[in-house]
Image (tube, rainbow, N blue to C red):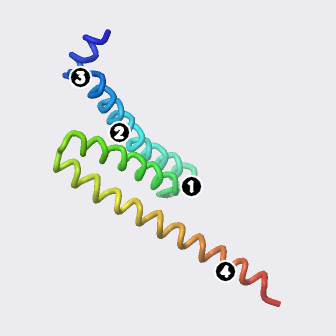
Amino acid sequence: MQEWLFELFNLDNWFEFWWVALGFLAQAIFASRFIVQWIASERAGRSHVPISFWYLSISGGILMLAYALYRQDPVFILGQSTGVIVYARNLMLIHRAKKKEADAVHGARDEP
């Protein structure tokens, strides 16, 4: 079985196999964000991007960036590193807005 796996993925050893496995896992996480967004939009009856989309984006993006760094692929590295910045920024904006909403609700309750 080892020979078959190594031949299938053009690998030399188990270390490379686990990097390829990580790459596949990263791609699955990253791709699942579209399914999550689709389901959320269907439920809302309109286009909707849930916060889980951004968590899947950053998780998959970081794992794919690690894989790209291992492969030393500059195109892949550039694409994933800029994407991770965008995903992180979106999560920061979402959490900032939620904090403002929570502060506004608590502030309104505290007023006499």
- Look at label 4 and name its amino acid: Ala
Image quadrant in which the N terminus is located:
top left
Answer with mark 2 or mark 4, whichever residue precedes in sequence.
Answer: 2
- Compared across the picture, whether 27 is left or right of 41 comes to left
Crowding at mark 3 (Cα within 10 Å: few <14, some 14-19, many 20+): few
Q: Under tag 4, what secondary structure?
A: helix
Answer with mark 3 or mark 2, whichever residue precedes in sequence.
Answer: 3
- Alpha carbons under labels 4 and 1: distance apart: 26 Å
Please name which of the two marks, 3 or 4, marks the residue nearer to the observer: 3
Q: Under tag 2, what secondary structure?
A: helix
Q: Which residue is the site of mark 4?
A: 104
Which quadrant of the structure image shows residue 14? top left
- Alpha carbons under labels 2 and 4: distance apart: 39 Å
Residue 40, x across and y down, in percent = 53, 50
Please name which of the two marks, 1 or 3, marks the residue nearer to the observer: 3
Answer with mark 2 or mark 1, whichever residue precedes in sequence.
Answer: 2
Residue 19, x across and y down, in percent = 31, 32
Please determine whether, in this image, residue 31 is positioned above or below residue 15.
below
Question: Which residue shows up at 50% across the image and 57% down it?
Answer: 46
- Look at label 1 and name its amino acid: Ala
Q: Which residue is the site of mark 3?
A: 9
Q: Which residue is the site of mark 2?
A: 27
Disc on res. 44:
1
Label pair 3/2, CB-CB below 8 angstroms: no
- Alpha carbons under labels 3 and 2: distance apart: 16 Å
Q: Under tag 1, what secondary structure?
A: helix
Question: Which residue shows up at 54% across the image and 67% down it?
Answer: 95
- Alpha carbons under labels 1 and 3: distance apart: 41 Å
